Amino acid sequence: MTAGVKSYAYPEVGDERLVVDDLPARRWVECASCVEGLDIEHVSEAEAWARKHHAKNLAHDRFRVVRQTGWRFTPRLADGLAPTP
């Protein structure tokens, strides 16, 4: 998993303005023809992995880099109601 999200994939955010780009992100490269993929730190790793994967699976020639950012809101009481899990 990408280094920035190894410890906790869904950091808690409060009432401050949410800036998604400032949150930790996970990136991986995946084959569009199957379920194989690899967590990456840099896009150069994506190209290297895709070339190796394609060499072993000639029909697998479409790839994508996926970036995922997760977060959760701080539970709080609103209008006297308990937070919903």
Image (cartoon, rainbow, N blue to C red):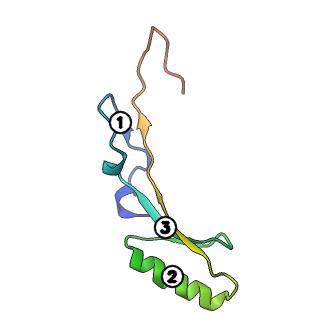
User: Real-space Cα distance between discs 2 and 3?
Assistant: 10 Å
Query: Is 60 left or right of 8, judged from the image as shown?
Result: right
User: Real-space Cα distance between discs 1 and 2?
Assistant: 34 Å
Q: Write down the residue under mark 3.
A: 28
Q: Is residue 1 above or below residue 68?
A: below
Q: Write down the residue under mark 1.
A: 13
Q: The residue tagged with tag 3: helix, strand or loop? A: strand
User: Real-space Cα distance between discs 1 and 3?
Assistant: 24 Å
Q: Position of residue 19 (x, y in %)?
A: 33, 43
Image quadrant where one finds the N terminus: bottom left
Q: Position of residue 52 (x, y in %)?
A: 55, 88
Q: Is residue 36 above or below residue 47?
A: above
Pointers 1 and 2 in contact (C-beta within 8 Å)? no
Question: Looking at this view, is 41 or 19 the one in front?
Answer: 19
Q: Of the residues shown, which amino acid type is indicated by label 2?
A: Trp
Identify the mark nearer the N-term, 1 or 2.
1
